[in-house]
Amino acid sequence: MTDRQPDDGGSLLADAARNGDGRNGDGRNACRRCAAAVPYGDRFCPSCGTDLRILRGGTTAVTAGGEPPRTCQDCGGEGVPGPSMPGRAPGIQWCGSCGARLGESVDRVEVDLGVLAGVSDRGLAHRRNEDAIALGRVVAAGDRPEAAVVCDGVSSTHRPEEAARAAADATLDVLLCEPGAGPTAPGLRMRAAVSAAVSAVAGLGGGAEGPSCTLVAAHVDDGEVTVGWVGDSRAYWLPDHGDGRLLTRDHSWAVEMVAFGLLDAEAAARDRRAHAITRWIGPQDHPQPDVTTLRPDGPGILLLCSDGLWNYLPEPAELAATVRTAGSTIEAADLLTRAALDAGGRDNISVVVLPVAP
């Protein structure tokens, strides 16, 4: 079991679903950051400037070490108490706005936005968590796209965790920007989002060995799924019925050897270079993402993950079977993470679970 944001009343998205457009009886909203009254229809809080249209969380929303804070470092939201769980210290606080656990190390990041959730875990062998996740949803009435990003820092470069966090946040910023502020076609918006990630990582400097990462991102709007990726972080479609399928194709040595007809799959997988990535985001690299779209004909789960999960559970049927035992999105993300830990946990593990209904 893990400490989680309470399901009953703890999710702002659940509140939004219960309360419709969130309007108070006097025609005003309350800012989720500072509680100031906001005229209905206003996008920004007139007091603190918070964008009321977007609910988001991720790795950079987590405060590392020290006394657990009462407010979220990332969004300024007030902490709310989490449930008591066996083996966990009491007094765990969650951000009531963006869903992140307050006061925890990035060794373990849990974000519960109700309708979508993610977990990023250091694993059992690495000294630090070099993965990053970012996820969010537009909560304005009548306009509810969702987006998520998973980035895996390239360990052979300097400060890979910085690349992962910068890329994840920059990508989410573009995917959740208002329609008039960027490309409207889903594929073009995804490419613009990855381009923003490339620029963000380039800004970290460091030369040829500077911070680098892989990336997989998804945008869901009106039942249409758009996925973009660079490297070997993956996206899976796991329908409610059936085994599901892998949506991405790894940018890796093994995959390219098979694609070029130079080796069969078994021989390529046995080679020590099998998992070497052939495309990544770094300060001196400007890769083009691959982009794919999907309009499911039935409900299911969109899963984004780093190789810390799929190295142990590569098959869609295995992933789907695990997800179907969960009672919530955060439980599904936790169960998948635990499966990777139980199988060895030799790498950082990052998982985002996003239900999709046509």
Image (cartoon, rainbow, N blue to C red):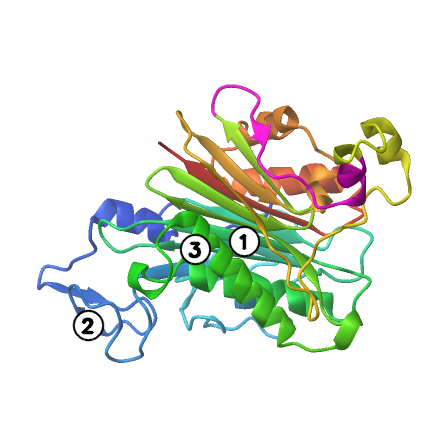
Vertical placement of 312 versus 187: above or below?
above
Who's the residue at 76% across and 40% down the image? 256
Q: In this figure, which residue is indicated by the disc labeled 1? A: 149
Q: Is residue 304 left or right of residue 307?
A: left
The residue carrying mark 3 is 189
| Residue 296 inside the magenta-drawn segment | no
- Tell me the CA gap for discs 3 and 2: 33 Å
Q: Is residue 8 visible?
A: yes
Q: Is residue 353 left or right of residue 146?
A: right
Q: Are marks 2 and 1 in contact (CB under 8 Å)?
A: no
Q: Which mark is residue 37?
A: 2
Q: Main secondary structure of the magenta part?
A: loop
Alpha-carbon distance for marks 2 and 1?
32 Å
Question: Mark 3 and 2 residues: CB-CB less than 8 Å, in contact?
Answer: no
Q: Amino acid at mark 2?
A: Ala
Whether residue 99 sits left or right of residue 318 in the image: it is left
Comes first in the chain, label 1 or label 3: 1
Q: Which residues are magenta?
A: 240-257
| Label 2: how many Cα within 10 Å (few below 14, some 14–19, many 20+) | some
